Image (tube, grey):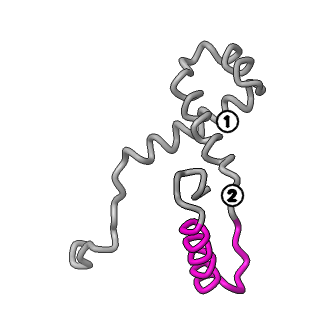
């Protein structure tokens, strides 16, 4: 990747070895999971579906995105819930004085 991005071969070799060494020192002996990026793609797709959904076009969207109408509704509901939650402030009751009770 370094060479493909214009780094000289000898520098790319040194950099890649240093990165490898740093990773080994930081995470050596641990089991690490690297996601394939599918979740990000699904999230983008789900956001797109939510943006396109108008309450009347579920059949068209289901066909367009190659899924069932039931699955489309689950996506819309999940994204809508996340959207609402992101816009609501949380209330912290732990900081209230006990004298007020």
Is 25 one of the magenta-colored residues? yes
Question: Who is closer to the viewer here, 54 or 97?
Answer: 54
Q: Is residue 67 left or right of residue 40?
A: right
Spot occupied by residue 34 in the image (x, y as percentages of width and height):
68, 63
Q: Residues within 10 Å of mark 1 (few under 14, many from 20)?
A: few
The answer for how far apart the CA atoms under marks 2 and 1 are is: 23 Å
The quadrant of the rendering that contains the C terminus is: bottom left
Q: Which residues are magenta?
A: 10-33
The secondary structure type at the circle numbered 1 is: helix
Depth-wise, is mark 2 or mark 1 nearer the camera?
2
Is 8 situated above or below 60?
Answer: below
Is 101 situated above or below 43?
Answer: below
Spot occupied by residue 8 in the image (x, y as percentages of width and height):
54, 60
Is 72 situated above or below 98?
Answer: above
Q: Which residue is mark 1?
A: 74
Q: Which residue is mark 2?
A: 35
Is 81 situated above or below 98?
Answer: above
Q: Quadrant of residue 78?
A: top right
């Amino acid at each position: 990747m370094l060479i493909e991005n214009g780094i000289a071969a000898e520098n790319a070799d040194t950099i890649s070895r240093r990165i490898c060494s740093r990773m080994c020192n930081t995470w050596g002996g641990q089991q690490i999971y690297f996601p394939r990026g599918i979740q990000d793609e699904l999230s983008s797709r789900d956001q797109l579906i939510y943006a396109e959904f108008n309450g009347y076009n579920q059949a068209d969207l289901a066909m367009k995105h190659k899924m069932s109408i039931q699955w489309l509704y689950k996506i819309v509901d999940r994204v809508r819930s996340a959207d609402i939650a992101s816009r609501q402030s949380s209330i912290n009751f732990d900081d209230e004085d006990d004298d007020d009770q």
